[in-house]
Image (cartoon, grey):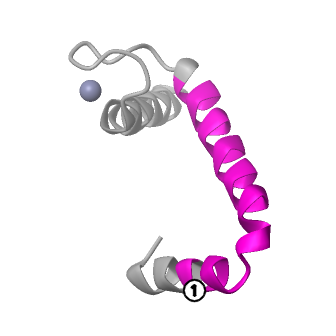
Amino acid sequence: MSRSDTDALIAEMTAHPEDLPDYIRAVEHLLEDRSALLKLIPACPVHGDECSPHAREWIGEQRAKELGMWESAP
Ligand SMILES: [Zn+2]
């Protein structure tokens, strides 16, 4: 989310405080989704579960492995 996105979101939330519970529910839903997704990936050896940098690295490694398999296929 860019700085202007964040500013726009804050401006909208300030203009409609009655919608705040909806925003909070939406954010909670996104965090639950993120958490469920990160639990599918082996834990980071340094930080444990739900480490985003480790998850990105792990996905990159899996992609590289997959590409390697494709390249070595006859
Ligand atoms: Zn980590």
Q: Is the magenta stretch mostly helix, strand or loop?
A: helix
* Disc 1 packing (10 Å; few <14; some 14–19; many ≥20): few
Give whichever of 10, 34 is nearer the camera: 10
Q: Which residue lies furthest to the left in this view?
A: 46
Quarter-of-image position of residue 40: top right
Q: Is residue 19 above or below residue 7?
A: above
Amino acid at circle 1? Ala
Give whichever of 25, 17 is nearer the camera: 17
* Residue appearing at x 48%, y 26% in the figure: 69
Q: Is mark 1 on a helix, strand or loop?
A: helix
| Place of residue 66 in the rendered image (x, y in percent of width and height, measured from the top left) | 50, 30
| Place of residue 57 in the rendered image (x, y in percent of width and height, measured from the top left) | 33, 35
Q: Name the quarter where the C terminus is drawn.
A: top right
User: Disc 1 marks which residue?
Assistant: 11
Quarter-of-image position of residue 22: bottom right
Give whichever of 45, 73 is nearer the camera: 45
Count of all numbered marks drawn on residues in the image = 1
Q: Is residue 57 above or below residue 43?
A: below
* Residue appearing at x 25%, y 12% in the figure: 45
- Region of the chain picked out in magenta, as a range: 10-38
Ligand 1 picture quarter? top left
Q: Does the magenta stretch include residue 54?
A: no
* Residue appearing at x 54%, y 78% in the figure: 10
Please state if 19 lies on the left or on the right of 47 as rendered: right
Q: Is residue 52 above or below residue 72?
A: below
Q: Residue furthest front?
A: 18
| Place of residue 38 in the rendered image (x, y in percent of width and height, measured from the top left) | 52, 27
| Place of residue 20 in the rendered image (x, y in percent of width and height, measured from the top left) | 71, 64
Please state if 48 lies on the left or on the right of 73 as rendered: left
Q: Is label 1 within 8 A of ligand 1 (CB to nearest ligand atom)?
A: no
Q: In this view, does 11 lie above or below 73?
A: below
Please state if 1 lies on the left or on the right of 36 as rendered: left
